[in-house]
Image (cartoon, grey):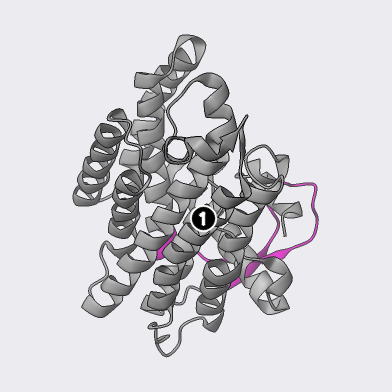
């Protein structure tokens, strides 16, 4: 769960910010109901973006209700929370599946206590995926894409595109799965594909310093090895990487422009999706490359619902 796929909240209208909160909290509640309280620790902005994209295409409407936050019971204020619905449950299942895959990968690759901890956690993660009811076809597709990604990473190519393309196809599969309308599915796939390529490149750029110190292969570091001094990119590399991720987002944004919100759908969904693609994700990339906005920043480690209160 990467945390790069967030809106630029300073550019959201008040009703859009409130709607975003309601989806975030609604997803948290759906995860708790579907896969248990511990699964809410993996709640991510990426999955909220998935829900918003699919809602903007489907036009499904679940309504909201005023509730207190179950994660932060000391907050007495009641806030709108989206009621449980199909897209929230779908995202909850996807989150469980991706978490299981990440733990399984750690169990294979890590060493010492980290590996032991991953192995101990894997059984619970597998049970939560089963409980979530993830379709077998989707589970098979996701695990197949990840196997392909791991095989390509094992080759340690001096290229980002090879691996980013696979991760893009992975998210494309997730975003489009189960959408009956062919045009809508094609739009969702293109948004997922662009977002996935962006996430892979941004995450690799964010990890360059840690990976260099640990002696690990990193696709961005391999591509720009002559433009990294210590663990800092040259200005030329920063601009090139930023241009690359913006290109990926331009394709996703172009697909979002093709969405025609169905009658009765939430108008906020599409506005927030466009905010994320045009403003929020480019801002995250700039902070990774030019400032302390990546994983080194505590602010960007927030993934759980208990941290959301102060994140907007």
Q: Quadrant of residue 50?
A: bottom left
Using the rendered image of the protein, determine whether residue 84 is visible from the camera's viewpoint. no
Q: Quadrant of residue 122?
A: top left
Q: Residue furthest bottom?
A: 263
Q: Is residue 64 above or below residue 166?
A: below
Q: In this view, does 263 lie above or below 174?
A: below
Extent of the magenta region: 64-88
x, y (%) of residue 145? 25, 44
x, y (%) of residue 232? 63, 37
Residue at numbered disc 1: 240
Q: Is residue 161 above or below residue 8?
A: above
Is 44 a magenta residue?
no
Q: Is residue 185 above or below residue 173?
A: below
- Badge 1 local density, few (<14 within 10 Å), some, or many (20+)? few
Of residue 59 and residue 163, the one placed in the foreground of this image is 163
Is 78 a magenta residue?
yes
Of residue 264 and residue 106, the one placed in the foreground of this image is 106
Q: Determine the secondary structure under disc 1.
A: helix
* Side (left or right) of 95 relative to 274: left
Of residue 112 and residue 216, the one placed in the foreground of this image is 216
x, y (%) of residue 48? 51, 59
Q: Quadrant of the C terminus?
A: bottom right
């Amino acid at each position: 769960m990467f945390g790069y796929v967030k809106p630029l909240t300073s550019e959201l209208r008040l009703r859009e910010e409130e709607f975003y909160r309601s989806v975030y909290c609604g997803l948290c509640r759906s995860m708790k109901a579907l896969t248990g309280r511990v699964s809410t620790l993996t709640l991510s902005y990426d999955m909220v973006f998935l829900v918003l994209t699919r809602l903007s295409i489907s036009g499904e409407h679940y309504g909201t209700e005023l509730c207190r936050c179950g994660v932060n019971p000391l907050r007495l204020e009641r806030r709108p929370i989206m009621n449980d619905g199909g897209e929230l449950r779908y995202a909850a299942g996807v989150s469980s599946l991706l978490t299981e895959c990440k733990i399984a990968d750690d169990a294979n690759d890590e060493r010492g206590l980290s590996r032991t901890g991953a192995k101990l956690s894997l059984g619970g993660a597998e049970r939560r995926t089963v409980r979530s009811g993830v379709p077998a076809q989707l589970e098979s597709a996701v695990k197949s894409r990840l196997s392909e990604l791991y095989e390509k990473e094992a080759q340690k190519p001096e290229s980002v595109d090879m691996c980013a393309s696979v991760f893009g196809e992975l998210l494309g599969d997730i975003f489009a799965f189960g959408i009956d309308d062919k045009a809508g599915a094609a739009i969702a796939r293109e948004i997922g594909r662009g977002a996935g390529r962006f996430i892979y490149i941004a995450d690799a750029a964010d990890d360059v310093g840690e990976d260099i110190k640990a002696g690990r292969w990193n696709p961005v570091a391999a591509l720009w090895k002559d433009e990294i001094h210590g663990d800092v990119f040259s200005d030329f590399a920063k601009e090139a990487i930023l241009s690359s991720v913006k290109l990926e987002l331009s394709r996703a944004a172009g697909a979002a422009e093709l969405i025609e919100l169905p009658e009765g759908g939430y108008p906020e969904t599409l506005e927030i999706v466009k905010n994320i693609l045009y403003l929020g994700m480019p801002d995250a990339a700039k902070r990774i490359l030019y400032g302390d906005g990546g994983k080194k920043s505590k602010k960007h480690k927030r993934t759980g619902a208990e941290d959301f209160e102060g994140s907007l």
